[in-house]
Image: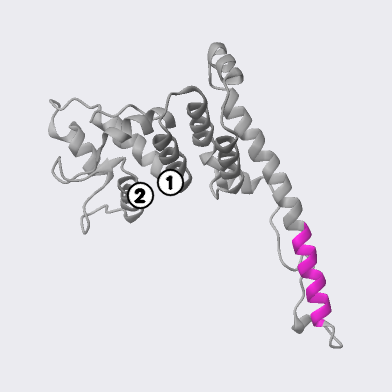
Amino acid sequence: MSDSDEVAKRAMWTLAGLGLTSAATAAGGTAGGLGMKGMLAVAEHVKTFKQHRAQERLEAFRLELMGPVTDKEREELLNREFSPDDFTVILESVLADVEFHKIPYYAKLFRALVTEELSGAMRSHLIRSFRSLCAADFQLMEKVCAATQSDERMPDSNAPEHIIRRLLPPTRSQGYDPLAHASAQSLISWGYLKHGERDGIPWPTTLAVTFAKVAGLSSPRI
């Protein structure tokens, strides 16, 4: 489910509908009182909204965590011990992240923290980067990883470097996408992409191999 889908499921609000008034609509000098009542009403609506949203997100996380795995993997996941700190951080991220459709990535991350042998430094780096990156960053990384699997002997238009260059056209070129480049910079800052080795285009690093495996992305050729 996308963020827009999540919003579309709920009725939209207006401040007037929530009872918030202004001085222009109030008479007899009571605007302040009516306005405060309106704000208290808004606060109650927000409280209820957050409770419903938390329930929806927790259920989505549960389904992602337990769904797309084999019976053997599910059994292992249910019986392996894990750190309460890890679980708390992931669950807080699921509830607080502005992007609903990052929940599948959080589920994959928690599954990896439970079942994979990861160093303390790697666990910390993965948790912090998953929280920081947006869904568009993960999507770009998937496309870059998939592109690296292309046969380098293919014609230029289908060679890995040319596919990635089409994903990230240079500045001032036709088709330049500043949001895609912002995603690339985020991935570079977390050490998953690097510049310079292949005609200046971003290319996956050794760290990207672990990141892709945990996030359920295509395995990159580095």
**Disc 2 residue type (three-letter):** Ser
* Residue in view at x 51 percent, y 40 percent: 102
In the image: residue 123, left or right of residue 94: left
In the image: residue 156, left or right of residue 131: left
* Residue in view at x 60 percent, y 44 percent: 92
Res. 186 mark:
2
Res. 133 mark:
1
The 10 Å Cα crowd at callout 1, few under 14, some 14 to 19, many 20 or more, is some
- Magenta part of the chain: 31-44
User: Where 84 sits versus 72, above or below?
Assistant: below
- Considering the image in quadrants, where does the C terminus appear? top left
Q: Considering only order in the chain, which callout, 2 or 1, is on the residue closer to the N terminus?
A: 1
**Disc 1 residue type (three-letter):** Leu
* Residue in view at x 80 percent, y 64 percent: 41
Q: Position of residue 149 (x, y in %)?
A: 25, 26
Secondary structure of the residue carrying tag 2 is: helix
- Where residue 32 sits, quadrant-wise, is bottom right
* Residue in view at x 57 percent, y 47 percent: 4
User: Where 105 sits versus 15, above or below?
Assistant: above
Q: Position of residue 74 (x, y in %)?
A: 57, 17
User: Where 114 sits versus 86, above or below?
Assistant: above
